[in-house]
Amino acid sequence: MDQSPIFSEVPHQSVRFDDGLTLDCGRHLNKLTVAYRTYGSLNAARSNAVLICHALTGDQYVAEPHPITGKPGWWEAIVGPGRPVDTDKYFVVCANVLGGCMGSTGPRSPHDERPDEPWGVEFPPVTIADMVRAQKKLVDYLGIARLFAVVGGSMGGMQTLAWAALYPQSVFAAVPVAAASYHSAQNIAFHEIGRQAIAADPFFYGGRYWAEGVIPARGLAVARMTAHITYVSEAALTRKFGRKLQGASDLLIGDRFEVESYLEHQGSSFVRRFDANSYLTITRAMDLFDLAADYGGNLADAFAGTPTRFLLVSFSSDWLFPTAQSRAIAKALNHVAANVSFVEIASDKGHDAFLLDEPDFHRTLNGFLIGCAEHAGLDR
Amino acid sequence: MDQSPIFSEVPHQSVRFDDGLTLDCGRHLNKLTVAYRTYGSLNAARSNAVLICHALTGDQYVAEPHPITGKPGWWEAIVGPGRPVDTDKYFVVCANVLGGCMGSTGPRSPHDERPDEPWGVEFPPVTIADMVRAQKKLVDYLGIARLFAVVGGSMGGMQTLAWAALYPQSVFAAVPVAAASYHSAQNIAFHEIGRQAIAADPFFYGGRYWAEGVIPARGLAVARMTAHITYVSEAALTRKFGRKLQGASDLLIGDRFEVESYLEHQGSSFVRRFDANSYLTITRAMDLFDLAADYGGNLADAFAGTPTRFLLVSFSSDWLFPTAQSRAIAKALNHVAANVSFVEIASDKGHDAFLLDEPDFHRTLNGFLIGCAEHAGLDR
């Protein structure tokens, strides 16, 4: 496994805010950098901007090759010319989240008090709302008063919900996909496994691995592997691997199941592009997410009087963010008479379905955005 | 975390077979020790014996305090005076599985060629059938030609199925609980996470941790925590913990979710009583289990002409060994006109329900055994 932190040398497009950002925890970051990418053109009325929010291990490279892995953008199925989020029509913005490791302020950024060192584990805990506030500064900087749409899956869906709750006048349409209004006990438990695996790695050095010139690759790989199982359905794993052996030979003399080497590959390729302290910070932000709790325990109150049009999408085989959680959000939105559509897409691909080729999902999103564009007068 | 391998000093009741055991992998163990416990009395006809098969991390201390932890026996809800497996009526036998660490031959036993060392990672891969063959030697040694019943949950259910397939004339009744006839890709994947976590522990030393006087406690704890999540349902985790904090204070200033400290406790108490190399060996045995594959791909053929009476039990919220897998076994048994009852118990406690207070399960098992005892002429 490659131990070199090669990703530190990749340059990213970014904007720096010298007034920093005050976090939910009460701490103030003196400086805030937001790394981002844009696709398409902002129209004269500045009314065609779509913000894409990425998931736990995603980044701003939504519709172009990844600068480290060289792989296609993580949502090229959704974002691009002629795609549901059509870059010929919309100005698409995607920012690396606060706490991330692809150029935005996070554990790898210079420490506020000791700028020769990275923050590391001393980076303050951040929340989904903190991530959204950082994105809001970017959106303001780009001169966009109102986003035509905010779209995101998984943790991106949490951000989408937080956007609609925090800045209802700035969000014409919101599409939380495979999302939830809180992180469940089971989800917290799976994240905790990953964090324990990272902390147990001898190369973690209490989070100061950067000072030793190493990375806790094995712990981070175990964390990724664990998470990966939760992203796929039992049916998808069975279809893809079943009980197939990697070679043609016999398990009893040392062969492995295909699913094992696949998982190991998932883990080892991940550590090349992701920072362990960022993984700790971002998983914690997801665990902390409980939108209703921020509004006295009543989710509907988060959306009282909202002008935003919502499309909620879930996938039938997603056991990490099951349909029931999207349904609960739809119910809360109905309670405040919001404009809401809710679609459960039949898929056996699990949580990951939001990233994959799911024509029904793509058609649904496309139709919703076309309808919203008409209402917003975008097509005039 | 306690690093001392204290469990090595506990004496266990056992029997040694000097002819050893030939394994499915082709290797021959020169010596075989089977550690076991019995409860109740064997009747004059030697016809009232019930073999209990334990799960991955269980052992022979089914109905008495555990010699290391001091906790009650793991199935005291099921086995004991007046219990469904009534020790006033039945002679109950439970053996530590081959590959285990509570006295039966396993990775901690002396190496066949270098008896001053334990087998460690050189212990040959074993199968569920190998475990059953070792138990058969014990049952023969005890002078029991036919077991009145074989009962087991989870991996114990796999052994129960293998008993019925390998020794149909020796099993009057079989009760596989929360079981499956093969280990699914998802289950293999979760086991692989645990194995990777153990292998990544710096105290694993390639499996020779015993030579260093340490144990890979953190890796083994991560493995246990991962497995533990799969044993409980999302509903049970939510009911027990939800998003409750451990203290009364604030997560953002360093508090933890209750579910996190609970998991950590599960992990750290486990490493006091379990051997990492045994965990590797036994999880592998489960992964290798595919009863149909041993019979040309047709599960029904494993039970052709079986005289055994079966009770299959599943739990509605068990996502590790879901009801569909018990149903598939019932179907195969029906195909060969076996005597089979199949019950899905409504429970929201997940896979662990088989170990917990589930009155419907206990009543079902009790009723089945009473009926079988009549047919076997046990009650005369």
Image (tube, coloured by chain):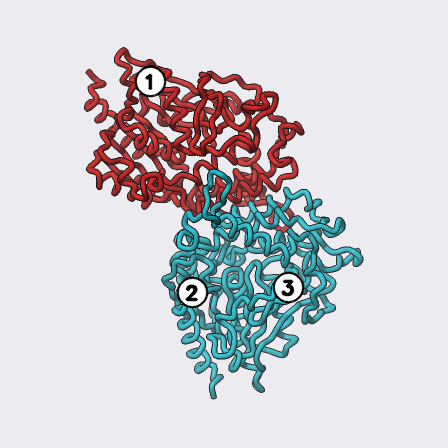
Chain colours: A cyan, B red
Q: Is residue A338 visible?
A: no
Mark number, residue A68: 3
Q: Which residue is mark 1?
A: B91
The verdict on a common chain for dots 2 and 3 is yes
Per the model, the C-alpha gap separating discs 1 and 3 is 64 Å
Q: Chain of mark 1?
A: B
Q: Is residue A269 above or below residue A257?
A: below
Q: Residue at x 48, y 79 (%)?
A: A82
Q: Residue furthest bottom?
A: A380
What residue sits right under mark 2 in the picture? Answer: A313
The outermost residue toward the top is B44
- Type of amino acid under label 2: Val
- For residue B252, side relative to residue B77 (left or right): right
Residues under numbered marks 1 and 3 in contact, where contact means CB atoms less than 8 Å apart: no
Q: Is residue A318 above or below residue A222?
A: below
Q: CA distance from mark 2 to mark 3?
A: 30 Å
Circle 1: residue type: Phe
- Number of callouts in the render? 3
Name above or below for residue A247 compared with residue A341. Answer: above
